[in-house]
């Protein structure tokens, strides 16, 4: 796995052509996290968070392709952050509440 920073676009494109298949070295699932470029949901593998752009998350494949400004520093996460765990738990709770509300509405409609 390569990350070319502060290199010319030609060097980055050459690396992607030479190594077109990215294999995640981590099997960690970042539940509830979406890659900002390929839109992969529940990112598997290392997650890269831009330190300058708070809403930018990159999967390994998009990181190595240099899709986000390569001059921006990133934080590499090999396991879910407390923030992503909290987000996943919040989404699960919302889903449970919606299901309970749908069941209540269905029960009231049947009466």
Image (cartoon, grey):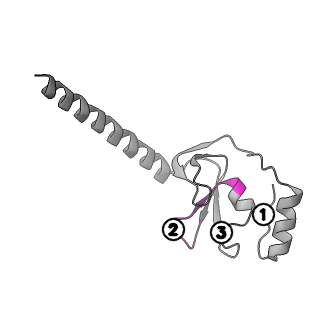
Residue 86: x and y in percent read: 42, 48
Q: Which dot marks residue 3?
A: 1
Residue closest to the eye, 66 or 93: 66
Q: Which dot marks residue 68?
A: 3
- Helix, strand or loop for disc 1: loop
Name the mark nearer the viewer: 3 or 1. Answer: 3
Q: How far apart are labels 2 and 1 at the CA level? A: 20 Å
- The reply, left or right, for residue 54 in relation to residue 50 is left
Q: Looking at the image, is 83 positioned above or below residue 56?
A: above
Query: Image quarter for residue 101?
Result: top left
Q: Quadrant of the N terminus?
A: bottom right
Query: Image quarter for residue 59?
Result: bottom right
Residue closest to the eye, 48 or 14: 14
Q: Residue at the left extreme? A: 111
**Which residue is pictured at 35% across the width and 38% down the height?**
95
Q: Which residue in the protein does label 2 denote?
A: 54
């Amino acid at each position: 796995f390569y990350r070319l920073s502060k290199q010319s676009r030609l060097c980055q494109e050459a690396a992607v052509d030479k190594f077109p298949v990215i294999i995640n070295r981590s099997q960690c699932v970042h539940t509830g996290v979406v890659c900002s470029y390929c839109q992969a949901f529940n990112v598997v593998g290392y997650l890269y968070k831009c330190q300058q752009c708070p809403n930018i998350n990159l999967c390994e494949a998009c990181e190595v392709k240099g899709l986000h400004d390569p001059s921006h520093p990133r934080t590499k996460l090999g396991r879910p952050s407390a923030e992503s765990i909290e987000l996943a738990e919040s989404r699960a709770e919302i889903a449970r509440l919606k299901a309970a509300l749908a069941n209540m509405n269905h029960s009231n409609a049947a009466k």
